[in-house]
Each structure stands twice: as structure tokens, then as C-alpha cells.
Amino acid sequence: MPVLSILGCKILQDEIIWLIANDLQIKRILIVANGNISEFTEKLDEQHIYYDIIPFEKLPKILNNIDRDELTVVVNLMELGLHAVPKILKSEVYQNIREMIPFSNGLLIFYGLCGNVLGNVEEDFCLEKDGCTVRILRDDERVVDDCIGATVGGGANYLKLLKTHSKEPAFFFTPMYASSWKELLNIDKLHSNPEKALKMAKMINDLAGYSRVAKVNTGLTYVKDIDAKIEEYAKLFGYSTFEIIGSQKIFKKMLFFDKG
């Protein structure tokens, strides 16, 4: 397989880095130039992983001239704010899939159901279209619910954790969620008064019964000062914290994706 493309949520960038770092078949990495990659490329630099940043419109020409005997990976990270409106998220993801299929032999979608809008993505693209196999994050039974479901090992364990902690509901924070929650909620982008927006978010959370933050220990250390970031959130909202053990099980399936 000469070109394996990854279309992913920015919040799953650590798992994408883990996949790249552990796949010895990869010979070249091309990152789509957009506003979502600065943190991602800094982490790649720290891991001494080499890459090229390419404008999307130049990818087809570059990929036409690659060595077909070596594996090239293309990474296209999407912005977090898309989650605010699931229909827009689906539209953007589907549009990017359509644009990436022509130059890809395989396309890995680093998303889950995400508001129940991406559950049919493999079927909608016929699993294999124009020689490109499309795969989304799955456990043994179905597409994972979201980034948390993916990082705790799939739907069954996610449901078990939710039931276990149902008496004192908790937000589950992966390392990237801990460092990106303001961006995910568009606190600074959509509100002229971030402090007021935080108070409103706390009110909504309190009405939902949240009182704790669970740190999902994924085993990945690309995000620095995770504990401090979680404590900052917990202090702002008046929550206690605890830790649960995550898993790379779902992402290992992507690592062993058939590359032809």
C-alpha cells in the first residue's frame, strides 16, 4: 500500500503519533497544512519523527511521484470546534473523505460516532471505493462512541465505567482533552466574556450532576503537565479528581491495518 491516509480529530493526535511511532513500515509522513497542526508537529519533533507539511491542493501531484514500494502516510487533522454541531462535523468529515480517497489506498478515520453522525461512514463509502479501503475506530462489536470510548478500550468498558461512577458522575479527561477543553467548548473563540462562559458551563454541568473529573491514563506522555491541567479545570468547577486506566487496544487495530 503506497499511501495510507489518516483523517482525524485533533483531540486524537497523540494516538496518531503513537501509531506512526510504532509502525516501522512508514517511510514518509506528509501533514496537511492547516491551523490544527502546531501542537502535533511539536510532538513529532520531540519524538524525532520527520515529516513534511504540504498544502492540501499540492498532495495529488506529490503523491503521483512517490516510490510505490514504500509506505507514505498522509495526516489531515480536523478542528475541535466542529463537534459543536454534529451535522456540520459529518459534512466536513465526509467532504474531506471524498477529497482524500482519490490519492489514498487506505483511509483511517480517527473518530467515533460523535453525536451518532459517523456510524455509517464505512457503509456510505462502500468500505472500499476506487481502490481505497475506509475504516473508522471500532471495538469488537461496533464503532466506538467517541474519543473517550476509544481510549478506554471500546463501548463495553466505557459503559461499565459510566455505570460504576453513575452515583457521582464524572467528566473523563484524556491528556489531549485536558489540554484542549477550552478549545473544544469554544470558550475563547465564541464568547467575548470567557469568565461568563465558564460560569454558564459550570451551571450546565451542575444541572447534569457532574462533580468529578476522571483522568484517563492512556499510557501516552506526549502532553506535558497533564495533572496540572486537570487540576486547573477541577478547581475552576469545584470538582474532585480520580484516575482510571485507559487502553491502546482500539488503536492497535489500526496499527495492524492491512497495508497490502
Image (cartoon, rainbow, N blue to C red):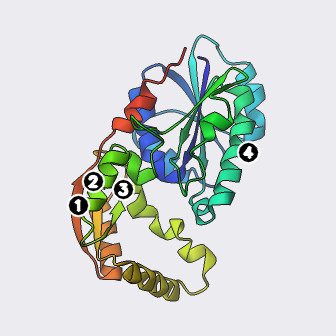
User: What residue type is disc 1 on?
Assistant: Thr
- CA neighbours of label 3 inside 10 A, class few (<14), some (14 to 19), many (20+): many
Q: Position of residue 113 (x, y in %)?
A: 52, 50
Q: Which residue is mark 2?
A: 160
Q: Name the secondary structure under disc 1.
A: helix
- Where 220 sits versus 49, above or below? below
Measure the C-alpha gap from mark 1 to mark 2: 6 Å
Closer to the N terminus: mark 3 or mark 2? 2
**Quadrant for the N terminus in the image:** top right
**Quadrant for the C terminus in the image:** top right
* Residues under numbered marks 1 and 2 in contact, where contact means CB atoms less than 8 Å apart: yes
Q: Which residue is mark 1?
A: 164
Q: Residue drawn at (47%, 19%), measured in percent from left and top?
A: 25
Measure the C-alpha gap from mark 4 to mark 2: 35 Å
* Residues under numbered marks 4 and 2 in contact, where contact means CB atoms less than 8 Å apart: no
Q: Find residue 199 and report its image quarter.
A: bottom left
Q: Residue drawn at (71%, 52%), measured in percent from left and top?
A: 91
Q: Looking at the image, is mark 1 or mark 3 nearer the viewer?
A: 1
- The disc placed on residue 95 is 4
User: What residue type is disc 4 on?
Assistant: Gln
Q: Which residue is mark 3?
A: 174
Measure the C-alpha gap from mark 1 to mark 3: 18 Å
Closer to the N terminus: mark 3 or mark 4? 4
- CA neighbours of label 4 inside 10 A, class few (<14), some (14 to 19), many (20+): few
Q: Looking at the image, is mark 4 or mark 2 nearer the viewer?
A: 2
- Where 198 sits versus 247, above or below? below
User: What residue type is disc 3 on?
Assistant: Thr
- CA neighbours of label 2 inside 10 A, class few (<14), some (14 to 19), many (20+): few
Q: Is residue 144 left or right of residue 1?
A: left
Measure the C-alpha gap from mark 3 to mark 2: 17 Å
Answer whether residue 221 is visible to the viewer in this image. no
Q: Find residue 203 and report its image quarter.
A: bottom left
